[in-house]
Amino acid sequence: MKLLLELPTHLRDVAAFALATGLRRANITGLTWEQVDLQRKLAWVHPDQAKARKAIAVPLNDMAMSVVGRQAGLHQVYVFTYQGEPIFQVSTKAWYRALERAGIENFRFHDLRHTWASWHVQNGTPLFALQELGGWETERMVRRYAHLSADHLAQWAGHAQIHG
């Protein structure tokens, strides 16, 4: 993704983690080391930090593990920092300048979550699994990505045949 190449390192890692996990901005910027288990390749969002008020288990894929590995030892409490301080704001001048250099218009940080969900659907992740991975409370919320893939419907397409 061209945007990642244009972002300064600290924002690149935050954005890459968003693309790897689908987490919301506040869950990424508020992520603490006590919420990460590198041995099990897992992170979690506490219920009081989740939009749906339910805990979210976050399996860490290779990209997420790589990003988290680069943060190790930079801060005692928070995973993502800039110049020794926790990152809380990502929509900064640096973010908007990177978007401009990448030639991207009308794009918010939250759109990284939508990109993550779209990639999952396009690669065949079942909607029930995506719902749990994304921490959506209802199936209706995750269904907005269902139109991106019809592969799961192919087995049924032949059931309505003309008989003559």
Image: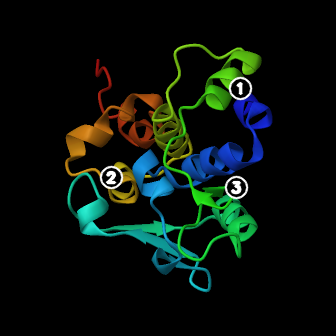
Position above or below: 78 against 115 = below
Question: Residue furthest toward the bottom?
Answer: 39
Position of 82 with respect to 48 (left or right) is right
The C terminus sits in image quarter: top left
Q: Is residue 1 visible?
A: yes
Position of 77 with respect to 100 (left or right) is left
Which residue type carries mark 2? Gln
Q: Earlier in the sequence, mark 2 or mark 3?
A: 3
What number is the disc on residue 83?
3
How packed mark 1 is, by other alpha carbons closer than 10 Å (few <14, some 14-19, many 20 or more), is: many
Q: Position of residue 134 (x, y in %)?
A: 38, 53
Which residue is found at the position 76% from the left and 46% from the top? 9
Q: CA distance from mark 1 to mark 2?
A: 30 Å
Q: Secondary structure at mark 1?
A: helix
Which residue type carries mark 1? Ala
Question: Residue furthest toward the right?
Answer: 5
State the image quarter where residue 5 is shown: top right
Q: Position of residue 25 (x, y in %)?
A: 45, 46
Position above or below: 63 against 96 = below
Q: Earlier in the sequence, mark 1 or mark 3?
A: 3
Q: Secondary structure at mark 3?
A: loop
User: Disc 1, disc 2: CB below 8 Å?
Assistant: no
Position above or below: 84 against 6 = below
Q: CA distance from mark 2 to mark 3?
A: 35 Å
State the image quarter where residue 72 is shown: bottom right
Given this view, does label 1 or label 3 mark the residue nearer the observer? 3
Which residue type carries mark 3? Gln
- Which residue does the numbered mark 2 point to in the structure image? 131
What number is the disc on residue 98?
1
Given this view, does label 2 or label 3 mark the residue nearer the observer? 3
